[in-house]
Image: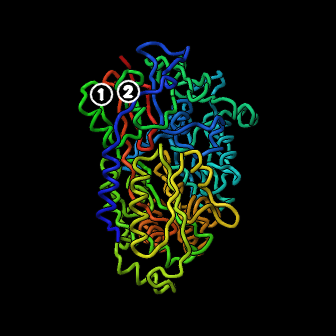
Amino acid sequence: MVTRRSLLQGAMGVAAAAGVGRINPDFLFTSAYAQEGKTLRFLGAEALTGNWDPTTHTNLGQLIVEGYVFGYLTRAPMKPDNPEELIFELATSMTPVDEYTLEVKLREGVKFHDGTPFTSADVKATYEYGCQPDRPAQWYPGQVKIDIVDELTCRINTKEFGYPASLYIYLSSFLPIMAAKDVENKAQLSARMNGTGAMKFVEQKGDSTILVANDDFYLGKPKIAGLEYRFVGDTTTRTLSLMNGEADMIERLEAEQVETISADDRFVISKALSVENKYLFFRCSKAPFDNPLIRQAACHAIDRESVLEILGVSGAPVKAHISPVKFGYTEVADYPEFDPEKCQALLAEAGFPGGEGLPELTYYTSVGFYPKTKEYAELITGMLQEQGFKVNLQTLEVAAWGNLLYDKPGGGEGNMIDCGWCTGSPEPDLVIRTHFHSSSKRITGIVDPEIDAVLDKERNAPSVDARRKVLQEETLPTIARKAPALALFSSVFIHAYTKGLEGLYIYPNGMQDVSKATLA
């Protein structure tokens, strides 16, 4: 029998064998907008969709680019010691009027990149459009109504929909504010970004997205003349590009690349615990994972500490279905741990002793974006097989994997799929309600009245403190017990950049603030 130790050693051997190859000349920057020493060249790990309507996608690479261009009511540094901290950006204050009303005061003198003044009408258009249930991004836990008081004052009103307006304190850090006239013209909204941020959109050309500094940025024109985001799906190529001076910053590094770059004093390594948890999602809408006993058994078959050994610097332990830098995080006392005896007892209780009678299970993973997915997926496959699960692992390129990710009528593709979920806000419902409430069925397809009830209870709590208590004592423990997914670890986001880049701030979701940055 193949043991967990031999599986782990094999997976780590594959990882250690990874080297630095030659760069493809097609990846060189050739933009006519680039200015030597002033344009920041960033190699991203995810391709962009080409649709610039922020409500149409859940693409992290695109969220990063939107973060340069759009403004937000608030930003959230999301530090582990203070995940609830907010920095006011387009808003100057957010004051509860009553349980269902949040008054927002807006910053004066801000303009969109096309010269249109920023007003309450833009906040109203953004929120009321983005909250529609047909929006793929699913920004909101429910619909909302905005009342305009004056040009720089509006009120978020949730009474019609029956939940507290305080939810939007944290959601305000995730919503890129669009111009009202663009929301009315969906073709324009999709074709180009028009924000209030430090960088202005110029064009998307192949795998490159070109931005230039916003001369009228309300904090002053950025010192960096422009930015080019280029998709390069291979970690080795990104690393070589940085070291050869063909890029200024790269992301999503693995342990081998970190070791190589750290040895070169020309570069800086940034490591940050992120808002992203990496999950093994179960397809709960079809057998056998429609049975919570089988899901729990699978969770107890997986040694997450061994997974973290493969990840090295790229992962951190987690014991809940939200990241430690999310509002309401707590270590769940009975979070499922590696326990073969418990796994076998649950399989027997479900009528499949030793796994006998279980169908073959297809497990989808990806390569090229998340660190070490192939290596740890092979390890997880072996662990499940040891306990009697018959698992067929399918490793796909990111685009093919993404096409299979979401649930569909009759059940999504395969039986298990791993995926991370990362948002630019401390708001936990952007993860747990999105994935585990029956109104969403995003990846798991789960329909469970008990999970719905505890999600509704925390959403409808009368105060922030009451909501935290429900999340920690009821919602997160119930999700852990029902196990629609197993949170394997929290991602540690690793960026490397030239020492000539100073004044950069990297948020825990991978977005960056370049408004005060300089590039030598």
Which circle marks residue 267 in the picture? 1
Front-lying residue, 165 or 257:
257
Determine the residue positioned at 24% across, 26% down: 265
Vertical order, 417 against 481 (above or below): above
Q: Position of residue 256 (x, y in %)?
A: 31, 41
Label 1 residue SS: strand
What residue appears at the point 54 percent right and 28 percent down from the top-left corner? Answer: 197
159 to the left or right of 376? right
Badge 1: residue crowd in 10 Å (few <14, some 14–19, many ≥20)? some
The residue indicated by pointer 2 is 242
Residue 462 in view, yes or no:
no
Quadrant where the C terminus is found in the figure? top left
Q: Identity of the amino acid at label 1? A: Phe
Q: Is residue 31 visible?
A: yes
Residues marked 1 and 2 touching at CB (< 8 Å): yes
Colour mapping: rainbow
Q: Residues within 10 Å of mark 2 (few under 14, many from 20)?
A: many
Relative to 499, say whether 54 is above or below.
below
> Which residue is painted at 62% across and 61% down in the image?
413
Q: Position of residue 188 (x, y in %)?
A: 72, 31
Question: Quarter holding the N terminus?
Answer: bottom left
Which numbered mark, 1 or 2, is in the foreground of this view?
2
Q: CA distance from mark 1 to mark 2?
A: 9 Å
Q: Is residue 141 left or right of residue 468?
A: right
Q: Nearer the viewer, residue 118 or 432?
A: 432
Q: Quadrant of residue 502?
A: top left
Return the x and y of residue 427 as percentages of the image width and height: 49, 53
Q: Nearer the viewer, residue 76 or 120?
A: 76
* 431 on left or right of 244: right
Image quadrant in which you'd find residue 261: top left
The earlier-in-sequence mark between 1 and 2 is 2
Q: Amino acid at mark 2?
A: Leu
